Image (spheres, coloured by chain):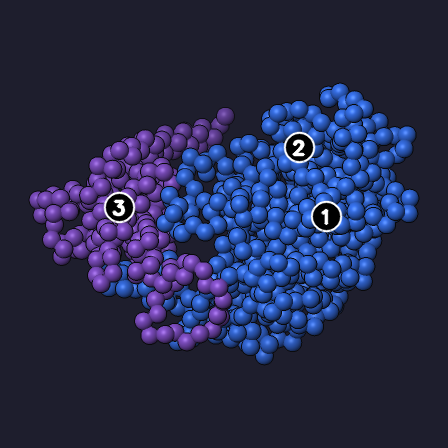
Chain colours: A purple, B blue
Amino acid sequence: MNLMDRRRAIRLIAGIGLMGVLLFWLYRKFGFGSKFDASELRRYKQTIDHLAETIIPETETPGAMRAQVGDFIIRMISDCSSPKVQYNFLRGVKQVEDHCQRKYGRHYAQCTADDRISVLERFERNAVSRFAILNKVNNKIFGTPFIVQLKALTVEGYCTSELGATKALAYDPIPVHYLGCMPLAPGQKTWAI
Amino acid sequence: MANINGKIKKDHQYDAIVIGSGISGGWAAKELCAKGLKTLLLERGRNVEHIKDYPTAILNPWDFEYRGQLPMSHRDKNPIQSGVSNAENVHFFASDEEHPYVQEKPFLWYRGYQVGGRSLTWGRQCYRLSDLDFEANSKDGHGVDWPIRYSDLAPWYDYVESFIGVSGHPEGLAHLPDGNFLPPFELNCVEKHLAQSIKGNYENRLLTIARVANLTRGWEGRGPCLSRNFCARGCPYGGYFSSNSATIPAAYATGNLTLRPFSIVSEVIYDDSSQRATGVRVIDALTMEVVEFFARIIFINASTIGTAAILMQSRSARFPEGLGNDSGQLGRNLMDHHSSAGAYGTHPGFKEFYYKGRRPCGFLIPRYRNLDDREGLAFVRGYNIQGGAARAGWQQAAYAAGFGTAFKEQLAIPGDWSVWVGGWGESLPYADNMVSLHPSHKDQWGLPLVSVDFSFRENEHRMMDDIQNTCADMLEKAGFHGVSTFNYRKPGGATVHEMGTARMGNDPETSVLNKYNQLHAVRNVFVTDGSCMTSSACQNPSLTYMALTVRACNYAAEALKAGQL
């Protein structure tokens, strides 16, 4: 082995070592691989209920809380999600609570309606870049941001619930005929399915 | 091995045995029964009775615990199955955990191990092949020549369509022959706009409604389709064609059918002295008991890969490489369509229009490439385009910014129109795209696991590039915005059109089956599922399997009557 090769080898080994330290640090910081505990998520049921209701509030049609969207979200995260999504979601809920304690000195559920909205707006601002490419890279490495996941699950849970589908949307279980091209009637809502 | 005494043997004697109750096996059973033959229909999976065994058919979204999704614990154990199914229809797809196979290269093998097979969950698209397809191999030299031409099959297409019921619109194209159609489903406004644009911009292209086995009016005591688009759950109205709703009940009505579920055929029994198959050996999937059944003719319709495996398992001194495999082609030339490439875009207009109901199909742009030999393209053969247009719904609105009342209101407002188009492309027969029996791995019944070695090649990849270009061009010319192309690069099997492992041909040295789907070397064994296909064409193939099946059944019954079988 000549000198150049030896130097290259040393650099390579140092590089691998550094990479290992970095991975270990990432692992500790983000905790990938730590076992998700569904009962821990269920302890945040009230927070999740209010997060969902803030996204889809009761108006002249039912809100997310009445449609039991919180239960759906917990079920989906606990049983239908990858460890990465589970971890991100639980961490996100905790961050919401931490933030509310720091800023308002109370739980999310106890915050005023305006504060509940501004908390979510803050999370959305921080999580979603206006550059699509950054979002893509971010999602690839760290998974879908908590706030995006929360909104998607809230909307899915609401729009596929009986109250959401039948009261807030147009639910047509047996259309009988397909009409391909009809004028959009005033007040016509999106089809639920 | 079961000890078959004379009495049992007599009880187990039929005129015909059909292996597999899917879309082609159901037809074989119906036709053979109708010809007066006592027919045993063997199915490796459980029974599924029309209507009674469609447990999710009328459920609402909120009736599903996970609103249609499958839990991670299930998906982890069944990665292939859960890639094609959801909670609405997972019970109609074989579990990977219980039915493993070996992937030499990534290959998605979606299986329907139950009575009715994949006819319960098929895409229902019905397109005839033409002489552009039947002559393709002989013209460009890939594969071997088909032993039949369109005129051989045309009356049988008529026959099949008149029973299954196909809705569609005649277009008068030589390369996509019209059939006997029920009234077509309607195109929506944006699809009509795209159709107009294509008609005005291209000489040899048109857009037509998909031709599907969904009944736009009542037909043969079934249907009509009620535009729910829940087909793959099983339709309680019989709104689409399946073995369960149509051919099996028709076979029963003759009084000649015996259906035996949970019957895994381990081999076809060959008798060297008569040079005929005498019956089949069956493993009862539940009791593990081995039973033999005997018949004068045997139809194998176990699906392309399953059929090849049964023939390969049927070894004898005469056929050491599998029954009827003198050519060495058995298991080879596996094909699947590719459906990875295409384009999408949104349309800013038509905001004042919507639709009602869930049409169980999209549209079709019939093949427009290599219609004659002088186009000078970088690939041979062609593709058709399938797609659909729709307005954005709450699913897309979920990604809008904001929270609260304003956000909620957006969920209920129909969004922009968008269109998605993708190319369904022909894949060439390659001898080394093949299935084989694994030398050591066995399933829970002691049968060798099937090993699949398949990849798309240069011709298919070049075709995918062309699909992207022509799709984007059509959408841009029609005024769509933000037109983007894609290539999902799905592995083989993803289109669920696997075929070719026991190809038909004129020459016994280079093919497994003759022009009537008989094994060249064992004339009382017929194979009429996808494995018989000599080339893949680009049309969805089920209609062709059905037409080939009834043609072969008709031939077999007449040959039996004439004492030639």
Give the spatial CA distance, label 1 vs label 2: 25 Å
Q: Are marks 3 and 1 in contact (CB under 8 Å)?
A: no
Rendering quarter of residue B540:
bottom right
- Kindly report which numbered mark, 1 or 2, lies closer to the viewer in this rendering: 1
Instruction: Name the outermost residue toward the left.
Output: A105
- Kindly report which numbered mark, 3 or 1, lies closer to the viewer in this rendering: 1
Residue A70, numbered label = 3
- Residue B500, x across and y down, in percent: 72, 47
| Chain to which the residue tagged by mark 3 belongs | A
Which amino acid, by three-letter code, is at mark 2? Ile
For image coordinates 71% across by 58% down, the residue present is B160
- Residue A145, x across and y down, in percent: 30, 48
Residue B254, numbered label = 1
Write down the residue under mark 2.
B264
Rendering quarter of residue B162:
bottom right
Under circle 1, the secondary element is: loop
For image coordinates 74% across by 60% down, the residue present is B159
| Chain to which the residue tagged by mark 2 belongs | B
Q: Name the foreground residue: B152 vs A119.
A: B152
Q: Name the foreground residue: A81 vs A1.
A: A81
- Residue B131, x across and y down, in percent: 77, 62
Q: Name the foreground residue: B461 vs B504.
A: B504
> Viewed as shown, does residue B407 lie left or right of B151?
left
Task: Please state, as top left, top right, bottom left or bottom right, where the C terminus of chain A lies in the image.
Answer: bottom left
